[in-house]
Amino acid sequence: MNGDEAKDVLVASEVVEPQGHSIVLEPSDEFVLTPQIKALADRALSYLDVGYAVHFAGPAGTGKTTLALHVAAQIGRPVVLIHGDDEFGSSNLIGKNSGFRTSKLIDNYIHSVVKTEESLSTLWEDHQLTTACLDGHTLIYDEFNRSRPEANNVLLSILEKRILNLPSLRRSGEGYVHVHENFRAILTSNPEEYAGVHKTQDALVDRMITIDLGHFDRETEIQITKAKSGIPTEDAERIVDIVRELRGVGVNNHRPTIRACIAIAKILSRRNGRAQIGDPTFWWVCCDVLKTDTAKVTHDGQSLMLGKVEEAIRRICGNHGNGNHAKRRKNHHRGATA
């Protein structure tokens, strides 16, 4: 990944300098470190310090990648970031043959004698996992269960025996290398019922220490929402309370996530809006962001979630100014431009 892509992803840390397959991180002043997050990070660092791999498991939007990056920044080693992919094979992780080199030597020192020697050698290209193992970097394997289990089998000997098995063509018949003592691994995964996710082999999970992540507590979500948008505390509280209430309805109780809080807050901040029942921007951004958490619709084409969103707004924000908003909401959700 290039530097610009890294800056978009590394919300928990700052990119100091990309270095080949790896990047150097430093903790970010913008990272929200509440008691809950600090406790999770301390647990993970305790396991990593002993040499165990850490596995953050949980639904989308629960901060797995952000926490992994924050923990990696605390370790202070360069970081190799890999995103799981169904198209991956083991060669995508460790490396592959990238071509051949030929050489030819013609010896005509004696004019009447011509001696010719030709040689052919294979060129090998190390990929991210090999780089991390050899140089002692911290591996973050994000959503590793989106890769097929057979691609991830290479991790078994790395995590158990600290040995990386490699094709013999890499180094003159050498079929393995010892993993650097500073190598550490942090993996994240989504639930198996998610689309595009493979069942993780028990042998791999048994070699990691799994920390199950759910949604953050209310105070943490409020602090994250404020930090990402700059809105007042009372507005962040209302947005978070609405989102947390809606997690109990719909077809997926894991949603809406903290991402919905951040999206609503950022748009309100940009539009100079407030999380108040009398603010039209607040109404339409909440409805647009939050109503999509179910595919069910009524006979008139309206999402069943929309009514729940409006109920939550009224309950959290109060019952003032509804008359003017009824017409605005009706026009907006029938296709009018807000």
Image (cartoon, rainbow, N blue to C red):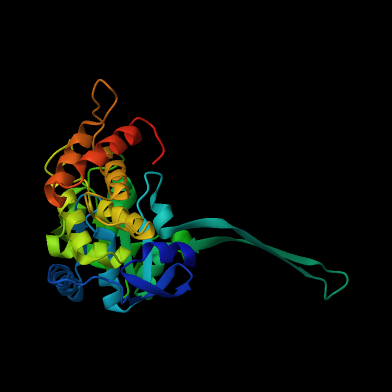
Q: Residue placed farthest to the top in the image?
A: 299
Quarter of the image with the C terminus is: top left
**Image coordinates for residue 294, horizontal then vertical, percent:** 23, 35
**Image coordinates for residue 220, horizontal then vertical, percent:** 17, 64
Answer yes or no: is residue 158 visible.
no
Which quadrant of the structure image shows residue 164?
bottom left
Which quadrant of the structure image shows residue 133?
bottom left
User: Camera-side residue: 196 or 130?
Assistant: 196
Residue depicted at 19% across the width and 73% down the height: 45
Q: Residue placed farthest to the right in the image?
A: 111
**Image coordinates for residue 281, horizontal then vertical, percent:** 32, 49
User: From the viewer's perspective, is residue 247 above or below residue 297?
Assistant: below
User: Camera-side residue: 273 or 100?
Assistant: 273
Residue depicted at 11% across the width and 43% down the height: 248
User: Camera-side residue: 300 or 167?
Assistant: 300
User: From the viewer's perspective, is residue 196 above or below residue 243?
Assistant: above
**Image coordinates for residue 166, horizontal then vertical, percent:** 39, 60
Answer yes or no: is residue 62 visible.
yes
User: From the viewer's perspective, is residue 42 above or below residue 231?
Assistant: below
User: Camera-side residue: 37 or 306?
Assistant: 306
In this rendering, the count of numbered labels is: 0
Residue depicted at 28% across the width and 38% down the height: 292
Which quadrant of the structure image shows residue 131?
bottom left
